[in-house]
Image (tube, rainbow, N blue to C red):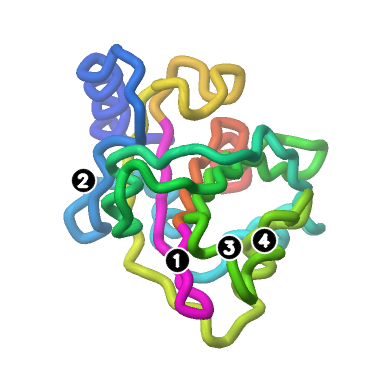
Amino acid sequence: MLSLYATDCRHLISRLYPLRRGGFGLWQNTGRCFQLPSHLRSWLTDPSSLTARLNQLGGKPISVHIVQQGWGRPSLSEANTLGIAPHSACLVREVILRGPQQQPWVFARSLFPATSLKGPLKHLRHLGRRPLGGYLFSHAQLGRSALQLALLPPTGLVPEALQGSSALWGRRSVFTLHNKKLLVSEIFLPAFEHTLTRTD
């Protein structure tokens, strides 16, 4: 079960952020983040491949449902994290990673600056339903920044049908491959939390 502290944090953040925001908020480095729920702690802080862990948990490869993919602009927070100008063009890819029985486990938002989609990474424009993590972690030279964590209020970034009225835990980091950067944010959905607490 969630600790009383974590539950209070969910309600507090939902009250403090009643308006729709144009970006992911309250991201903090893992060392500065407030108390994490015990059932999600290892999932939020593990730097290894999330795709591989989800495959192991579900007993088979996860499926990828594309919510949207197209050219857009990063939020100010995302631009600062990537070290690019807020007006920079990015390919924005939003997907749902589904476990057994098509349970929606993770909402993932990936930003590929246009400058990163040249040369050896240009094919990432056409990932389709292949998980990004499976590709990234197949490269020994992959670099990754420290993880940032957040408890995210319902802001319209995660589809309302998936998030409902609850705040959700997420993590994000910048990956570097062939000297190109991309930002990946992964939000753990209620169905995933239910799976974890049911199997504890």
User: Range of the magenta residues?
Assistant: 168-182
Task: Please name the amino acid that badge 2 sits on.
Answer: Phe
Mark 1 is surrounded, within 10 Å at the Cα level, by few (under 14), some (14 to 19) or many (20 or more) other residues, namely some
Between the residue at mark 2 and the residue at mark 3, the CA separation in whole angstroms equals 35 Å
Query: Looking at the image, do the residues carrying marks 4 and 1 touch, with CB atoms under 8 Å apart?
Result: no
Q: Secondary structure at mark 3?
A: loop
Q: Earlier in the sequence, mark 1 or mark 3?
A: 3
Task: Please name the amino acid that badge 3 sits on.
Answer: Leu
- In the depicted structure, whether residue 130 falls above or below residue 187: below
Q: Earlier in the sequence, mark 2 or mark 3?
A: 2
Label 1, on which residue?
Answer: 181
Mark 2 is surrounded, within 10 Å at the Cα level, by few (under 14), some (14 to 19) or many (20 or more) other residues, namely some
Q: Earlier in the sequence, mark 1 or mark 2?
A: 2
Mark 4 is surrounded, within 10 Å at the Cα level, by few (under 14), some (14 to 19) or many (20 or more) other residues, namely some
Q: Please say whether residue 176 is one of the residues in the magenta stretch.
A: yes
Between the residue at mark 4 and the residue at mark 2, the CA separation in whole angstroms equals 35 Å
Between the residue at mark 4 and the residue at mark 3, the CA separation in whole angstroms equals 7 Å
Label disc, if present, on residue 124 of the rendered structure: 4
Q: Is residue 39 visible?
A: no
- Name the residue nearer the viewer: 32 or 137: 137
Label 2, on which residue?
Answer: 34
Mark toward the viewer: 4 or 3: 3
Q: Please say whether residue 86 is one of the residues in the magenta stretch.
A: no
Q: Secondary structure at mark 1?
A: strand
Residue 137 is situated, as x and y percent measured from the top left of the image, at 61, 74
Label 3, on which residue?
Answer: 117
Q: Main secondary structure of the magenta part?
A: strand
Quarter-of-image position of residue 67: top right
Residue 73 is situated, as x and y percent measured from the top left of the image, at 43, 39
- Name the residue nearer the viewer: 29 or 157: 157
Query: Looking at the image, do the residues carrying marks 4 and 3 touch, with CB atoms under 8 Å apart?
Result: yes
Residue 198 is situated, as x and y percent measured from the top left of the image, at 61, 39
